[in-house]
Amino acid sequence: MLSFMFFFMLMRYSDVSDCIFCAMQRGEIPFAEVVSNEFLFAFMDIGPLNHGHVLIVPKEHYANIFEVPPSLGAEVINAMQGIGKAVMEATGAGGLNVVQNNFAPSGQAVFHIHWHLIPRFEGDGLLKWTPGKYENNNQMTSLAEKIRKALA
Ligand code: AMP
Ligand code: ZN
């Protein structure tokens, strides 16, 4: 029943003009709040990768990392440190992933920026990192050059 409600709400609020996280702030959708301040609110992710998975969300609507004013950065880091430590303590986790998705190909499903704090336990098998490789060093350095040019 809970998962049906979750998918219904996600479908209903997935477009930019009707954002689920903004609707939560307006009190239209219940959620399990952890903490909130002038800039951010944090709550339990309803589909946790591990129990204790928390989302940190700016109160202002920004779709992704490219829209967030850099001045909010210090608030976000401060929240990650405080809430991240509390998540680890409360769950007994030995590690913590901070994840933030941008655009659909990255896995972003809610287009109001948020940071995932995911408690990690030895051997839990989540988020396995499988390294790829370049054909040769030149392929890597020419891509670095291309990125440098894009920065200019
Ligand atoms: P992302 O794929 O990075 O956009 O992550 C969106 C996250 O929002 C997912 O982990 C969902 O489980 C979570 N989520 C969506 N709707 C709710 C809700 N109503 N309450 C709590 N978490 C939610
Ligand atoms: Zn929003």
Image: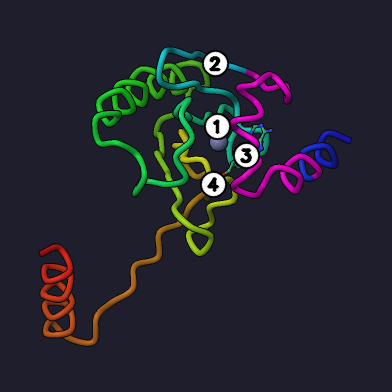
Which of the marked residues, 1 or 3, is nearer the chain's N terminus? 3
Q: Is residue 77 above or below residue 19?
A: above
Q: CA distance from mark 4 to mark 1?
A: 19 Å
Local SS, label 4: loop
Local SS, label 1: loop
- Which residue position holds label 1? 53
Disc 4 beta carbon < 8 A from ligand 1? yes
The quarter holding residue 17 reads top right
Pointer 3 with pointer 4, Cβ within 8 A: yes
Q: Position of residue 115 (x, y in %)?
A: 44, 37
Q: Residue at x 52, y 49 (%)?
A: 126
As drawn, the label of residue 19 is: 3
- Which residue position holds label 2? 34
Q: CA distance from mark 1 to mark 3?
A: 21 Å
Q: Is residue 50 above or below residue 78?
A: below
Q: Is residue 90 above or below residue 122?
A: above
Left or right: 22 with respect to 103? right
Which contiguous range is marked in magenta? 8-32
Q: CA distance from mark 1 to mark 2?
A: 11 Å
- Which residue position holds label 4? 111
Which of the marked residues, 4 or 1, is nearer the chain's N terminus? 1
Local SS, label 3: loop
